[in-house]
């Protein structure tokens, strides 16, 4: 897949999310398990929702720290689901179309772009588009916050 890297300014996105340490080996499965805990609480509150989002923080070879959530306007923290936000600012971003298991390629493109452009990446996140049975129509936008 050919990726186009864009630099743009983005606004913050408010999320209802769970902060967790997840296994790199079971990353996809654990993200789904966390969404299965977030969505019932968001639905119970009846708030307006948007896309699913995963924010990636630092990790090590075996685990990563993430916020797994959904865009939710007017959400009130409940249990282990809290209100968090993606950062606002200048980002490098690209769109991935296809299986979620192939998202690493989009991250690698952004990492190479940062290295060759002399820009240092900060926090990273993914915004998942609407589900489609056809993987070629599944869009995920990947963002790297660019440090000043």
Image (cartoon, grey):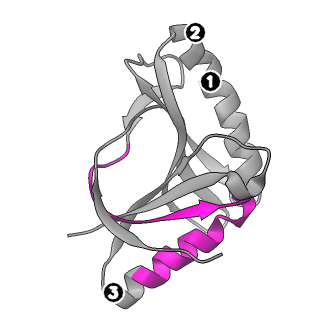
Q: Is residue 62 magenta?
A: no
Q: Are marks 3 and 1 in contact (CB under 8 Å)?
A: no
Q: Does label 2 or label 3 sit earlier along the sequence?
A: 2
Image position of 87 (left or right of 70)? left
Q: Are marks 2 and 1 in contact (CB under 8 Å)?
A: no
Q: Is residue 109 magenta?
A: yes
The circle drawn on residue 44 is 2
Q: Nearer the viewer, residue 18 or 13?
A: 13
Q: Does label 2 or label 1 sit earlier along the sequence?
A: 1
Q: Nearer the viewer, residue 60 or 86?
A: 86
Q: Secondary structure at mark 2?
A: helix
The circle drawn on residue 117 is 3
At 42% from the left and 19% from the top, the residue drawn is: 75
Q: Which residues are magenta?
A: 86-113
Residue 59: x and y in percent read 54, 62
Q: How many marks?
A: 3
Q: CA distance from mark 2 to mark 1?
A: 8 Å
Query: The N terminus lies in which quarter of the figure?
Result: bottom right
């Amino acid at each position: 897949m050919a990726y186009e890297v864009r630099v743009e300014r983005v606004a913050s996105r408010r999320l209802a999310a769970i902060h967790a340490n997840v296994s790199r080996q079971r990353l996809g499965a654990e993200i789904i398990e966390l969404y299965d805990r977030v969505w019932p609480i968001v639905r119970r509150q009846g708030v307006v929702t948007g896309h699913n989002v995963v924010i990636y923080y630092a990790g090590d070879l075996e685990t990563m720290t993430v916020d797994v959530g959904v865009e939710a306007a007017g959400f009130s923290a409940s249990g282990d689901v809290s209100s968090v936000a993606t950062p606002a600012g200048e980002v490098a971003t690209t769109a991935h179309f296809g299986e979620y298991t192939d998202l690493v390629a989009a991250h690698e493109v952004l990492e190479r772009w940062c290295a060759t452009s002399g820009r240092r990446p900060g926090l990273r996140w993914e915004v998942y588009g609407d589900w489609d049975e056809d993987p070629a129509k599944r869009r995920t936008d990947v963002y790297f916050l660019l440090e000043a």
